[in-house]
Structure formats: C-alpha cells, structure tokens
Image (tube, coloured by chain):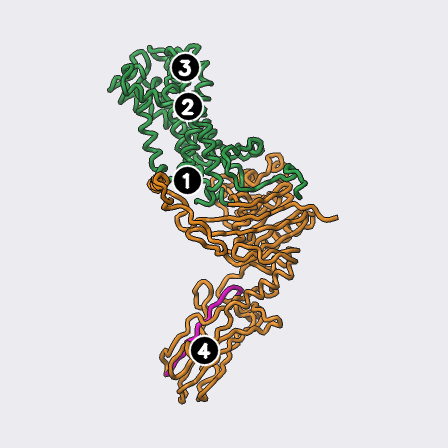
Amino acid sequence: MAARTVIEVSDVRKRYRLGVIDRSLVTDELAAAFARLRGKPDPRGDIHAVGGDQRAGDQFWALRNVSFNVAQGEVLGLIGRNGAGKSTLLKLLSRITLPTAGRIRMKGRVSSLLEVGTGFHPELTGRENIYLNGAIMGMRRAEIDGLLDEIIAFSGIEHHIDTPIKRYSSGMKVRLGFAVAAHLDPDILVVDEVLAVGDAEFQRRCLGRMRSVADSGRTIIFVSHNMFSVQSLCTRAIWLDKGEVRADDSVVTVVRDYLNECSAQTNEQVWTDADAPGTDEVRLMAIRAISADAEGLFSTTAAITIELDLQNHAITDFDLNIQLIVHTDSDIVAFISDMTESIGTAIWPVGANVVRCTIPSDLLNDGGYRISVLFQRKGNRHFLVQDAISIDVQEGPRRGAWFQKWQGALRPALHWVR
Amino acid sequence: MDAENRSDWDVVIEPSKGWWRIDLRELWHYRDLLRLMVRRDLLAVYKQTILGPLWQVLQPLLTALVLAVVFGLLGRMAPADQPPLLFYLAAVVPWTFFANVIQRTSQTLVWNAALMSKVYFPRLVAPVATTLSTMVSFLLQLATFFVIALGYRVFSDLPWAPGSNLLALPLLILIMSVLAFGCGVLVASLTTRFRDLGFLVGFGMQLLMYASPVIFPLSLVPDGSLLRHVIELNPMTGVIEGFRAALLGTPIDLGLLPYSGTAALVMLIIGTLVFQRAQRTFADVV
C-alpha cells in the first residue's frame, strides 16, 4: 500500500516586489488613484511579468511552478543555493506568508521551527516563557502543564527557571527554546537550520531528536545548507534552483548532482590570445582548479590543485613571481601564496609554461573562495587578474560531531600534542 | 487526489482574495496564547518598577487632577454640584482606555513583527490581547474611581450618589471596547501601508479628546452650534456622557448611545476586515 500523502504542494508561485515594497506614502496612493482616473497606468503599478526570467521589472518571482507531494513518514530535505527560494517555501509551509498563486494542503498538526525560542520575552521568567513559547508554537496549556517538568529537565536549567530570561546567557535561552520545541508533538515538522546555533552537544541532541521524530512515522521537511546533515537525516531531497524545482529524487542522487554543479561552476577560465590578461612580456592563458577527489568534487578533505597556463613572450631573466590571493566569500583574504617562496627563481623558457600550486586537503573551510593571480616583476606589481576563478568547497566527511558551519576563513587540520 | 474531500486536509494554504476570512474556531483554539499575551503585556511593563501596577491607576488619576484644577477650578467648566475630581475622573478613565487601545493596537503589527515573521498564529490574537490587557488597567482604574467616590461620600459635603444609572455601565463598557478595538485594528492595518499614520495617531487622539466632552460637559456647548455637531459626531461623546451619568448619577441622555453603538459595530466590521486583509501580506512588507 502506498503511503498516505500528507503534504501536497501544487503549482505554487510567490512574487515579491523589488525596491519599493509597497506604496508606503499617502502621496503614492493618491498618484495611483489619479492615474487610474485618467486612464493611465499606475506609476508604481505592476509591470507585467515576462515569462522565463526570474526578474521582471520591479518584480521578483521567488518561487515558480513548484509542485511536489510528501508521503507520511518521509523526511524531505530542501537544498539549493542562497536565494533559490528555500526560505520562501519554508515561509509558505509555515503560513507566515501566502503564495501569489497555487495551493499547499497538509494533513495533521503542523509545527514549524524557523528559530528556537520564538516570542521569548526578556522580562518574563523561564517558566513563564515556556508557556508563552509553547502557546505561540500552538501547544495547549494543558499539554504544557503535563510536559513542564520534562521540558525543564531537558533544558538543564532547573536552577534558573524562575529567573527573568534577560539574565540568561544566549546558550541558556537556546536550550530553553529547544526544550520546548523538542516536546512539540506534530504530525508534520518543518525545520529551518535552527541547528545553526548552540554547541556541538546541543546540535547532536537536535539531530537525535529529529531522527527519533522521523523514526516514529512523522513527516519532516528539513532545510539546510549542510549536505552532510541533509544526507544523514533525509531520505529524499528537492533541489530548488532560481525558484524552480530542479531535481526531486533520493537524497543521494540529488545531493550528488547538486555538488557536481557547485563544483562545475567557475573553476576554470580559458582566454584566447586576443583577450588573455597580461602584458607583452607574459600572459595568463588559462587557470583551473582540479580536485584530487575521485569524483572531482571540491571538498574540505580533498587537495585542490590550481593550474596556470602561461605564455611567456619576452621574459628572459629570473625576475618573475606569481602570487595566488585567496579571498573568502565574505571578502577576507584567507591567505596569499608566493611562488618563489616555494620553488625559488628560475629562467622561464619562452613559449607555453604550466605552473601548479596545490592547496592541501584539510586546509580550506567549507564555503566559497575566490582566487586572484598577481604577477610580479622585479618585486613590483606587474598585473593582477582579479577573481580569476572561484571554487565552492563542500563539507567533506565530518570530523567529530559538529554538524554546522565551522567558523573561520580556513579550517586547517593542525597537529596537537599532549 | 481530486476525489478527496477538501475537509480531509487540515491546513490549506492558498492566495485569498476574498474579504471575509475570519476563522473563529481557530481563534478559539488559540485562546491560551491570547491569555498568555495579555499576561505578558501586564507583567512585562511593570517589572522592575517600584510602584508596579500602581502606575496603571496613578496616570489617569494625575491627569484627572490636572484637568480638575485647570479646567474645573480655574476654568469653572465643571458643574458646581459635582466634585471636580470625580467629574473629570469619570471621563478620563474611559477616554484613557479608548486612546490607549488605539495607540497600542496601532503598533501591534510592528511590535510583533519579529514574531510574525517566524511563526504562524491567527494575527487577530495580537490586537485582541492588547485590548484585553488595556481592559484590565481600565477595570483597576474604575475600581479606583469607586474608592475615591466612596471617600467623597464619607468625608465631603458634595456627596457622591449614583443611582440606578450604574446599571448602564456594562453596556457602556461594551460599546467602548468594541469601538476602540475596531478603530485600533483599522489604524493598525493602515499603518502597515502608510507609515505616516503612526506619527499622527498620538496627535490625533489628543485632538479627538478636545472634540469630546472629556474637558467640559456637553451641556456647556450651545445646542445646534457647529461645535456641538462636531462633538456629537465623535462616537465617544455618547460613551463619555454615559459614563458620567452612570458614575455620577446625573440624568442619562440616551439619545447619543444608539449612534455610538452603531458606530462601534461598523468600526468593528470594517476594522476587522481591513486587518484580515492587511495581515496576509504583512510578513512581506516589513
């Protein structure tokens, strides 16, 4: 017997306006009214959407034609890049906002967890906030009464439960919020990356709790950037791309395809003789990043080789140096690597040359990096190829029990001694 | 799938263009949240203050005292057969409720914005909670009125003697609350669209007070004058005159109450409908 469908999303679209979100001034409203009166188009009105493009005029289609069903007991992961529409879909499923068109239907009690501790009031005590937060999440008072001792015990802050939570540390607040959330008893649970806060122990408990919810036949929709936690938790995944469902399959297939595409992004650039950056002395003809991973994925646990194709036109002395400048996504210089520091100086044969630089495994963090190439002659800047390529490093098999973004521009595996 | 009845689904999320979509059953289901939000409003404001809930009572009392001195004793606007303090308190208490509900309700969507962008609950719960928590302060203030009035009765040569008019009190409270809630949610929904309005509310409420018989008895304004018409247009006029009659025992003028009652109902319906429409897209606007 096929499992019962408990979530049905059919042809859902969501449109946002860009820039001016709404007529926020009375004058705009008046201008629109006058325009209508004279039979002219509203100066702030909709520009009719042109099919195809996600952006049309000042409108933005965050979701287009999204349809899928979820059966009871399925654990569905939603993946995709930033801005692919994951959060919008989550907001629709949580009834925070309504779709522009289409319909979502669900069976049973739905709880959505977009953050823990929603609605906590700093002046109220922990105990009072358990009731408030529980009620906001849709729990009845009698239910909370019955679970109160369990919730307090789970949070591990029995001693401070009658203290106003403004005196709590942020960790204590999170623990209290999660203790309430963990005792929700929904048929369908919609979870954002709430695990993004808290310590490793806390995250372990979160995932453990979600697994036990899933094992008891409840349905979960889980949104995450983290392919590792998606893979370890979900059975099926949907890949959202520019507001549309790009793939809907088993988690293994979808995650593999997604990672492949992330890797295939811009990790190679090849120029022609006419447009190659450089000078009459030397030009950069191509740059590519190559992963040592068997499947060619860029991951934290695979070494990455940066390969440069140079065309030496006129340099006959020793004085050429190349530096790789690696920026993180947040525009921090992660590191700079200097060629002559490694291999010293040499005379370059005129013609084609290949230079390779290997970034060892367990050095980069997961996330995006942009690589610029600086050419130096006689200690001075010769030319710079800004952001020549970028690589998107994915989480490799995890070390330890940390399931969230590891802080830092880099994540080197260092040697510890005791 | 099509064969399945619509009622098989517990949650249906679709764009709604209609006006009348108020799920009263759902609202009832969230009554615990309502109760807790009222509690939160009451507890949170006065924590860490020395006088605590006493402030609820002190504020209108001081206002009434100032009015009694300035307009009652110096301006001689209060009728001579009434203690000025009681005369003003009887009007300031309902007016404070009315003004506070509108001012607080008009901000509920903005204050609860963080909450509303993270979790679903029937949005109407927020303004209802605000109205109810303001009602609690109102009842405290009303009790204070009775305490002071009893004091006058015992110690003063201007005795306080309310009559059977007191029986009109529940009806007056009902009209006042419905009117305040209706106006409040209407202003709240408009504020999300027109931010300018937020600045106007405080000033507007002050202005409206002068167009009501809070400061002077309606009988002081000549019958048939333009000012009288303007004041009678204010639906709170009937309510405040009614409160004075009920609390002070002066003859009750029932002529204005049907208008106030009708206005309250109309405001309730319009306000709720506009609010329900505004709240749907609210999360996208803030």
- How far is mark 3 from mark 1, CA to CA? 38 Å
Check disc 3 and report the residue beneath it.
B246
Check disc 2 and report the residue beneath it.
B263
Give residue A149's position: percent from left, percent from top.
Answer: 62, 40
Give residue A303's position: percent from left, percent from top.
Answer: 56, 73
- Identity of the amino acid at label 3? Ala
In this rendering, which labeled residue sits more in front, label 3 or label 1? 1
Give residue B265's position: percent from left, percent from top.
Answer: 45, 24
- Identity of the amino acid at label 4? Thr
- How far is mark 3 from mark 4, CA to CA? 93 Å
Q: Residues within 10 Å of mark 1 (few under 14, many from 20)?
A: many
Question: Quadrant where the C terminus of chain A lies?
Answer: bottom right
Q: Which chain does green denote in the image?
A: B
Front-most of residues B164 and A353:
A353
Check disc 1 and report the residue beneath it.
B192
- How far is mark 4 from mark 1, CA to CA? 55 Å
- Identity of the amino acid at label 2? Ala
- How far is mark 4 from mark 2, CA to CA? 78 Å
Q: Chain of mark 4?
A: A
